Image (tube, rainbow, N blue to C red):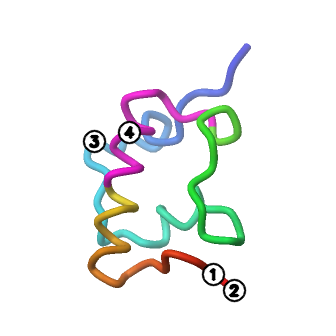
């Protein structure tokens, strides 16, 4: 039995790049995106998550690298 996708579980339709608290849950301590296997997020939402993280980094809301 696999875990359900985080976004389906919490009924989140749109993954927003401005919601950094949710995005940080899917980043490791070095600010890299965690793999789909580790996060149990569906493939569609993993792609949307990656796009949201990239947008947040570009806007300066999330770091590219954490030291």
Q: Residue at x 53, y 41 (%)?
A: 6
Whole-number angstrom distance, CA of label 3 to CA of label 2: 32 Å
Q: Nearer the viewer, residue 8 or 50?
A: 50
Residue 47, how many percent across, how many down?
Answer: 38, 39
Asked whether disc 2 touches disc 1, contact meaning CB atoms under 8 Å apart, the reply is yes
Q: Viewer-nearest of labels 3 and 2? A: 2
* Count of number-bearing discs: 4
Asked if residue 55 lies left or right of residue 7, the reply is left
The residue carrying mark 4 is 47
* Numbered label attached to residue 67: 2
Residues under numbered marks 4 and 1 in contact, where contact means CB atoms less than 8 Å apart: no
The residue tagged 1 is 66
Residue 51 in the image, given as x and y percentages of width and height = 32, 52
Check disc 1 and report its element: helix, strand or loop. loop
- Mark 3 or mark 2, which has the lower sequence index? 3
According to the picture, the residue beneath numbered tag 3 turns out to be 13
**Would you say the magenta stretch is mainly helix, strand or loop?**
helix
Q: Using the numbered discs, state the Cα–Cα distance from disc 2 to disc 1 in whole angstroms.
A: 4 Å
Task: Give the magenta range.
Answer: 40-51
Query: Which residue in the rendered view is the most extreme toward the top?
Result: 1
């Amino acid at each position: 039995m696999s875990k359900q996708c985080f976004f389906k579980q919490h009924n989140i339709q749109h993954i927003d790049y401005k919601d950094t608290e949710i995005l940080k849950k899917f980043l490791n301590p070095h600010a890299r995106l965690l793999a789909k296997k580790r996060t149990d997020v569906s493939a569609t939402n993993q792609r949307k998550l990656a796009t949201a993280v990239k947008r947040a980094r570009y806007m300066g809301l999330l770091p590219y690298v954490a030291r």
